[in-house]
Amino acid sequence: KQEVTQIPAALSVPEGENLVLNCSFTDSAIYNLQWFRQDPGKGLTSLLLIQSSQREQTSGRLNASLDKSSGRSTLYIAASQPGDSATYLCAVYPDKLIFGTGTRLQVFP
Amino acid sequence: KAGVTQTPRYLIKTRGQQVTLSCSPISGHRSVSWYQQTPGQGLQFLFEYFSETQRNKGNFPGRFSGRQFSNSRSEMNVSTLELGDSALYLCASSFYEGFQETQYFGPGTRLLVL
């Protein structure tokens, strides 16, 4: 059974710091991995999608990497801003989307 | 393009009642999937519909059902509501079947069962 874990569960940092959020999954048989952000009480916004054949994807200040063999992905956020405060979720797609537990990020001025 | 819309946004029901939630995907999208989000279980996949057919189903009891119409709009129904059904219900849409591409989520319907 595929399980997805995210570490840390919560993170509070001052503005300007570079951050790394971790996602690990137990079964490497996935088609892709996706990163989302969720603002309180709202739906999810897709950030990055990495196909299983890819190693990383970049969008603006965000960079996500994927190591299928070790069952790990990292989301790197450069020069964090208060507007980055949200919960970040990773999800893997074997036969359906399976979500991780999330990392709640707070960036303070 | 307009985003994914869900109605109603908030709902209060009592145990034993049934409820129907609606999701309108982005124009042109043919796949709609549904998720339940609770503090204890996190985000869990309910089912996916593509071209009016259920393509995939999560591990939820038969009280949870859905359907998709020819215009790709989807409804989810929960019968005989239980307290544990209180959750944020999210739907997402994409053009293709499955989850090979970016999923676009709606704002969700928050259901409270008393």
Image (cartoon, helix red, strand yellow):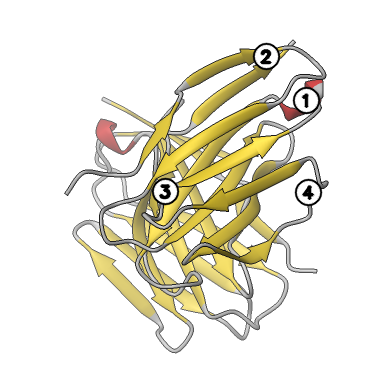
Helix, strand or loop for disc 4: loop
Task: Give the residue drawn at x 52%, y 57%.
Answer: A90
Q: Relative to B35, is A26 above or below?
A: below
B38 relative to A68, above or below: above
Picture coordinates of residue A58, whole percent (x, y): 26, 68
Q: Is residue B29 above or below residue A6?
A: below
Kind of residue at badge 1? Leu
- Estimate the x, y position of residue B65 in percent, counting from the top left: 69, 46
User: As shown in the figure, which amino acid type bears the numbered disc 2?
Assistant: Lys
Residue at 80% over, 69% down: A1
Of the image marks 3 and 4, the number of the one nearer the N terminus: 4
Q: Amino acid at mark 4?
A: Phe
Structural distance between the alpha carbons of marks 3 and 4: 21 Å
Q: Which mark is residue B60?
A: 4
Q: Rate crowding at label 3 as few (under 14), some (14 to 19) or many (20 or more) other CA atoms within 10 Å.
A: many
- The chain carrying label 3 is B
Residue B28 placement: quadrant: bottom left
Residue displayed at 46% across by 25% down: A41
Q: Which residue is mark 3?
A: B73
Q: Is residue B21 visible?
A: yes
State how far apart marks 2 and 3 are (Cα): 23 Å
Q: Nearer the N terminus, badge 2 or badge 3? A: 2
The residue to which callout 1 is attached is B81
Label 1, secondary structure: give it: loop
Classed neighbour count for the residue bearing mark 1: other residues with Cα under 10 Å, few (<14), some (14–19), many (≥20): many
Q: Do the residues under discs 2 and 1 have CB atoms within 8 angstroms?
A: yes
- The residue closer to the viewer here, B46 or B66, is B66
Residue shown at the point (38%, 62%) measured from the top left = B94
Residue nearest the viewer, comparing A58 with B100: B100
How much space separates mark 2 and mark 4, taking CA atoms? Answer: 20 Å
